[in-house]
Amino acid sequence: MIRPLRDGGPLLSDLTAFIAGLPKAELHVHHVGSASPRIVAQLAERHPGSRVPADPEALAEYFTFTDFAHFIEVYLSVVDLIRDAEDVRLLTYEIARDMARQQIRYAELTVTPYSSVKRGIPDAAFLEAIEDARTAAERELGVVLRWTFDIPGEAGLEAAEVTARMATELAPEGLVAFGLGGPEVGVERPQFKPYFDRALAAGLHSVPHAGETTGPGTVWDALTALRAERIGHGTSAVQDPALLRHLAERGIPLEVCPTSNVATRAVADLESHPLADMVKAGVLVTINSDDPPMFGTDLNGEYAIAARLLGLDAAGVAALARNAVDVSFLDAAGRARLNAEIDAHLADWQRHER
C-alpha cells in the first residue's frame, strides 16, 4: 500500500535512508555529464586554457543554466576537456566509483564517441579506454556498466555516420543501445532513421531522447521513425492523451529525470513536473539523474524527489527501482539477481520498521 510522505517528518528521513541503501539501476545518465566537480577540476588543470573553472567551488556557479541552449554550451565546454584516452579512462572509472557509493549496481551510460573522435582521440584508443574502465569497475567496484552510443543531434549526419560506424563495425563488448541526444529544436528525428536502422539490424536497442524541449510530435517521430524502445525524457508526452495511451498500452518506458528538466528549464519547477500524470496514465517510468553533478543531484536525490511527487512509501520506491531493472538491457540472470537484491533490501527494511 502506498502511503503519503510527510515533508520534513520522520517518514521522509527514514525513506531517504532506505533509498541510500537501495540497490539500483540507472538507464539515462551521460558519460561526460557525470564528471564530478573534482574530476572536472582535475581535467581543467591538466588542460589549461579552457574557460571551465579549475576551482570545484566555482563550478557550482558555472553549472547554473539559463536555458537548454546554455546547458548545451556549458556541456560542450566540459566535453572539450576530454582530450586523450587517459582522460576517457579516468572519467569512466571515476563515474563508476561515484555510482558504487550510491548502491548503483548497473548503469547504461550514454556515451558520445563522436565528440571525442573529432577532437583527435583515435577510435580504437577511445573504445579501449572505456572498455578497460568498464571491466575494472565491475571487477573492483561491483558496478556493471553498459554503453548507449548516442548521436549528438546538433552535429548532424556526419556525427550520425561516425556513431553508427563505431557502433556497428567496431562494436565494443559493452555496447547495448543506440541513442540520439543534444538539442531537439531544429533537429528532426526522422533524418536519423537510416542510422538507427543500421544499429537495430546489428542487434542494438533504440533509446533516443525526445519530447524534452519540444512537443509530443517529437516523441511520435522517435517511435515511428527511430523505432524507440524507451524514450529519453518524454516530458511533453502528457500534452497528448493518445500518446500517453500508446506508451502505456505498448509498455514503452519513459526515462524521467526530474531535476534535469527543471535545470534546463524544460519544466518550470518540481511541483510542475508531469511525473505523477505519467504514472496516473499507466505509463511505465524509470527515475534517472541525466547529468548529475552539473545539476547538483545524484540518483538517490532523484528517487527522493520521485517519492515525494508520487507519495510513495518504501515499497513504492522499491517498485520504481524494479522498473529500471525490468526495462534495462541487462541479461535475464543479471536482472533476476538485482531484483532479488532490491526485494531483500525492502524485506529487511520492513522487518526493522516493525
Image (cartoon, rainbow, N blue to C red):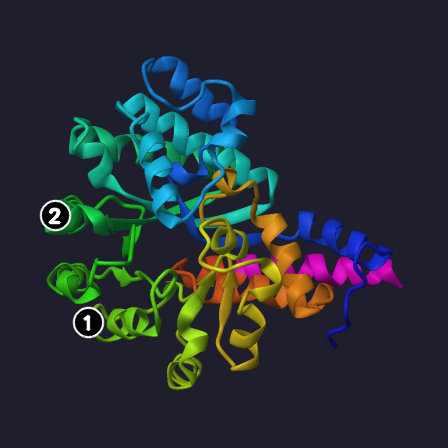
Residue situated furthest front in the rendering? 66
- Asked if residue 345 lies in the magenta stretch, the reply is yes
Point out which mark residue 165 bears. Answer: 2
Any part of residue 293 in sight: yes
* Residue 79 as seen in the image, left or right of residue 285: left
Q: Amino acid at mark 1?
A: Ala
Secondary structure predominantly adopted by residues drawn in magenta: helix
Residue 194 occupies quadrant: bottom left
SS at badge 2: helix
Could you say where residue 44 lies in the image, as x and y percent from the top left?
39, 19
Magenta-highlighted residues: 337-354
- Asked if residue 193 lies in the magenta stretch, the reply is no
- Between 223 and 315, which is closer to the camera in this rendering? 223
Instruction: Note whether 242 is above or below 109 in the view shown.
Output: below
Q: Amino acid at mark 2?
A: Arg
Point out which mark residue 316 bears. Answer: none
* Residue 20 as seen in the image, left or right of residue 267: right
- Between 215 and 328, which is closer to the camera in this rendering? 215
Mark toward the start of the polypeptide (2 vs 1): 2
Residue at 31 percent of width and 46 percent of height: 174
Residue at 55 percent of width and 76 percent of height: 277
Pair 2/1: label in front:
1
Residue highlighted by disc 1: 225
Could you say where residue 345 lies in the image, as x and y percent from the top left?
70, 56
SS at badge 1: loop
Residue at 32 percent of width and 35 percent of height: 130
Residue count near mark 2 (Cα–Cα under 10 Å), binned few <14, some 14–19, many ≥20: some
Any part of residue 343 in sight: no
Q: Quadrant of the N terminus?
A: bottom right
Could you say where residue 241 lies in the image, as x and y percent from the top left?
43, 85
Residue count near mark 1 (Cα–Cα under 10 Å), binned few <14, some 14–19, many ≥20: some
